[in-house]
Image (tube, coloured by chain):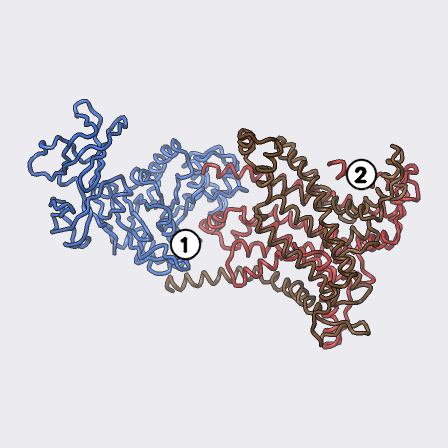
Amino acid sequence: MSVGEAELQRDRAERRRGLFLALPSFVYMILFFALPLVIVLVYSFATRTSSGSTSLSNWNLDAYRKLGEPIVRNVVVRSIVLAVITTAICLVVAYPFAWFCAHQRPNVRNLLLVAVMIPFWTNFLVRNYAWRILLSTGGPLSSLTERIGIGETNLLFTKTAVVIGLVYAFLPFMILPLYASIDRIDGRLIEAGRDLYGSGSQTFRRIVLPLTMPGVIAGSILVFVPSMGAYVTPELLGGGKETLLGSYIVTQFLTARNWPVGASMSFVLMAVMLVSTIIYFRAGGKNL
Amino acid sequence: MTERSGSPSNSHAAVSLRGISKIFDDVTAVDNVDLDIADGEFFALLGPSGCGKTTTLRMIAGLEIPSAGSLQIFGEEVGPLPPNKRPVNTVFQNYALFPHMSVEDNVAFGLRMRKVDKAETARRVAEAISLVRMGGMEARRPAQLSGGQQQRVALARALVNRPKVLLLDEPLAALDLKLRQEMQFELKQLQREVGITFVFVTHDQEEALALSDRIGVMDGGRLLQVGTPEEMYDAPVDRFVADFIGRSNFLHGTLENSTTVCLSNGDRINVPVVDSDVIAVGDAVQVSLRPERVMVCDPHEVPEGHARLQGRVATVTFLGNSIVYHVQLDWMTVVVETDHRPDLRRRAVDDDVALWWRDDAIAVVRP
Amino acid sequence: MLIFLYAPIILLVVYSFSASRIPGQWGGFTSEWYVKLFEDPRIQRTIGVSIRVALVSTVISTMLGTMSALALERFKFRGKRVFDALLYLPIIIPDVTMAVMMLMFFTQAFDLLNLVFGIGLSKGFATIVVSHIAFNIAYVSVVVRARVAGMDATLEQAASDLYASRWQAFRYVTLPLIAPGVLGGALLAITLSLDDVVVTQFVAGPGSTTLPVYVFSLIRKGVTPTINAVSVIMLVASLILVAGSVGLQRASAARGRQQLRTTGGK
């Protein structure tokens, strides 16, 4: 056998090994992920017949046109508003904390970061449920505010409760990328800013903020996207009173039996996610 | 073929490459290399990064298979064989010691893979560990060793298998300067002790000169010249080789006949006999003039019968043991290095000087 | 900040021992709810389903995810880029969309099987496991890939230079070195499997629901002290897993530092 043939053979054997390793997952993901995705896409162009079943014979954009109807539009707008508020609160709360973490000794810093991550790893449902207890009428928070004389608080089943729950759930997603970008700032740049007559706030606005922008963008997207699609939190803390996009989609499937609309809204949600992911990678998110 | 100079081309060559090429996708990493390495030789493959030296070594090791050509080890064709079927072992760059195994387990690895019996393995491992003077460290993990110690373990791990040829990929590059010098000495010593062929890859010309019996210089995938360190320094045949090993001035010209070059300023100079297989009469050539082999004197003091160049001192740089002059000729600048001795007259900037050299102090090289 | 993060969890634990029938009020110490909990057959059954789903989906997704990670980091093959992209999607796709996808897929697939082969299948344990594997492969593969990427590929070459076959090189060098990553991936898979409500809710059958889905439906009907107790059980389970992965990270970080010293000369 000549070396040329041997070279080709070894190359082919390597590719075969690679394919052999990847093939089980590849087949699995195509069958149980890519195919379902295509089915949803196809259904989003279908029509719901009067009997409640779905007709594929008539392709149209009706399900997407629903976005223009006031009910659906309100759901989408409400979801966006809540997600934006959640993101903003996370940003405001997380920035100083991330800054504080980045300026501690390495041991303290690691301890703080682990402390932030632990609640994030605990059961999602339990975390939401805990707030339900905390905010309940006559519950711990209410009795606390009563005792210090502010009076009873009835936050449960309000938008505020939903935002609190979302902030609680997704705060670590904001803290970690912010921490990473703040940690990377060269301290001499800030000193140089002060040396060149920048005030504290000027230095922050013109030097620190632009330098940590990738972290801000990455963190914002990591909070915004799951907030948009949240289902468990609004159900538990909002009491299902004010429907958000996630709940609306679930209802379309489990109650209203309108699959085309549910499918199209799932795709709208995924579009938000895809666009955000692209922005995330553009902002250098992969390095965070 | 570009290969030159005394290759012992008999059937007992330890390693023999004939027309070896390696093409990755569209890039030719190694281009038609012929090379014979003799049994017991300490051979260096020298060149800048990306010149193909490491790929050549990896082909000998079996980590890459050549795209074309024949590769023999002691007369046996091994080109298509995988690394675990070849009588060679490798000391990797950064050593590639298994971090999860002790020194002892690292050294024993090859014997265990070949199912050598336990008593024999234990004996040979102990022997190899004492050969590299690592006794007492058997239970340590690689992370607990210094760079020099890791290097020794990597050597023991390869040598314990009694390879016919030991391959070393930049064996000293990861060490700091002082340790590198110590290990150079140890490597040379070790090679004499075990008496097998060592082939090593380096980008460091001093290391290659200090360690090896012969050197092969590579550039752009081609093997430019092979020879002893002295041959490579004194009689380079290629401008790249002259420039890579040591420093040199290059005077442009044309080869008029096998002993005369006509320089581009019109002067004719005598040169050592040029092998017509390497450079043909009439070719454009360059004359390599080592800075320390050029003599500086007053314009009229050049001894009879020597070529000369007239110029003016442009800069003087004092380096302690030597002085470097940049001498401006009307068509180029020549760098000259002279000893710093009380009996040699020191020149000043703007002095008019003449430069001369012995005819055998220069070499004609391909441009 | 840390108070905000931990107070809800700690209060939940405290109130789970409250004798009051109203879940958010203190009425003296009792462990009554825990006793009740373990007497409830529905909860026992759903705990059983949860554990079985988590174990089966973790074992399979860890194997498949590890193989994918090796393929993507160490090999070239046709369709690699498509495969890579396909493995990223489950991580970024919203829960609800994933749930919708799996529901529609199983409904269609079962209709088709019924029509063509006359096999009547329904949603249940298997559909939950299949769905969990579908998102877990991606997570396992990301975790293991990081580990494989951090491992010097020349170690495998060194093994083959020292007469190891491909299998031996994997068995004695690659596998021990990526083991912490594989274990970390498995822990993440268990956690995600035990965590999931939305996808499972869509693909669970009437007889086989996991604990979180059952608890979710209970909470929506109204909170009871028993739910407090169940939540604490779930909390403890996830904390054990966290402790495992934090410990693992520490161990491999320590080894990473050692390794850094190994190659630090360069």
Instruction: Please determine whether, in this image, residue B50 is positioned above or below residue A143.
Output: below
Q: Which residue in the protein does label 1 denote?
A: B62
Give SS at disc 2: helix
Image coords of residue A277 (percent x, y):
62, 53
Q: Amino acid at mark 1?
A: Gly
Q: Are marks 2 and 1 on the same chain?
A: no
Left or right: B344 with respect to C161?
Answer: left
Q: Colour of chain B?
A: blue
The answer to the question of whether label 2 and label 1 lie on touching residues, with beta carbons closer than 8 A, is: no
Task: Judge whether residue B54 can be spotted in this image.
Answer: yes
Instruction: Please determine whether, in this image, residue A252 is positioned above or below residue B200.
Output: below
Q: Colour of chain A?
A: brown
How many labels, in total? Answer: 2
Image coords of residue B293 (percent x, y):
19, 36
Image coords of residue A201 (percent x, y):
62, 33
Q: Amino acid at mark 2?
A: Ile
Image coords of residue A193 (percent x, y):
55, 32
Closest to the observer: B21 or C175?
A: B21
Numbered circle sitting on residue C10? 2
Q: CA distance from mark 2 to mark 1?
A: 61 Å
Chain letter corresponding to the colour red? C
